[in-house]
Image: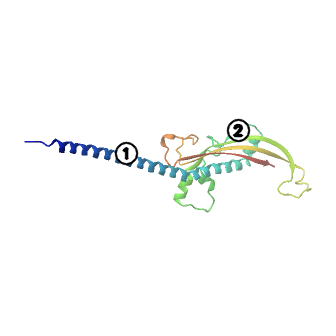
Amino acid sequence: MKTDHKNNNQDGMALVITLILLLTLTILASSIFMTVNRYAETIDNISSRPQAMEAANSCIDQALDWLDTSDGASWLNGDTPIDLAAEGNPLNKKTVLEDTTMEGVTRGDMFSRVLEKSSCTKVILTKVSSESARGERDGGEIGSETSYGSSVLKYALKIEARGVFNVPLNSSGTAIKFDNWNSTSNIVDVEVHVGYTSF
């Protein structure tokens, strides 16, 4: 009996070509899958960035409100920077939900959960300069005894805030635990320089 070596060689070559094509299609499919995943993570990250920005802005507003308290007024007399979000300080573990809660206003569960995930890990106030100035107070009429010529203190302040959204924090609420990071987690650092007038 005679064997046809020509057909066996062609069958083997067809198998090799089929395996090469299958490998090429697998690599192509996996690269498309990785690209789509990366794109989805980028979209998640971009869409959650405004919540982290809102947290930073909220903490800056709260820091300015804190300056109107007796503790804030005492701090203005010194020169030491303070981190209001540090453990034991007034903005520690403060969420945007707590900042926006008003009496008689109810929020949906989903909206509340988003706001509870937005907070700050640092809010550092630094006094850059201060000066005493004369001027009018509360829009009073020029020349009146209660306003014109009264002395006011003007300060230049730097506020550095780190707003976070859906970021796992340590028990003190001041440090990020990167082991539980996910695609919707986001951090925003904001630095502002403001003028503050103390009457």
Residue 73 image-quadrant placement = top right
- The picture places residue 164, in percent across and down from the top left corner, at 57, 47
Q: How many marks?
A: 2
Front of the two marks 1 and 2? 1
- The picture places residue 135, in percent across and down from the top left corner, at 87, 51
Residue at 67% x, 48% y: name it.
60
Residue at 33% x, 44% y: name it.
23
| Res. 81 mark | 2
Pick the front one: 5 or 142: 5
Q: Earlier in the sequence, mark 1 or mark 2?
A: 1
- The picture places residue 37, in percent across and down from the top left corner, at 45, 49
Asked whether the residues under the numbered discs 1 and 2 touch, taking CB atoms below 8 Å apart as contact, a structural biologist would say no
Pick the front one: 39 or 131: 39
Q: Secondary structure at mark 2?
A: loop
Pick the front one: 5 or 172: 5
Residue 10 image-quadrant placement = top left
In the rendered image, the quadrant that contains the N terminus is top left
Pick the front one: 13 or 172: 13
Badge 1 local density, few (<14 within 10 Å), some, or many (20+)?
few
The residue under label 1 is 27
What amino acid is found at the position of numbered circle 2 in the picture?
A: Pro
What amino acid is found at the position of numbered circle 1 in the picture?
A: Ile
Task: Give the CA distance from mark 1 to mark 2.
Answer: 55 Å
Q: Secondary structure at mark 1?
A: helix
| Res. 42 mark | none
Badge 2 local density, few (<14 within 10 Å), some, or many (20+)?
some
Residue 142 image-quadrant placement = bottom right
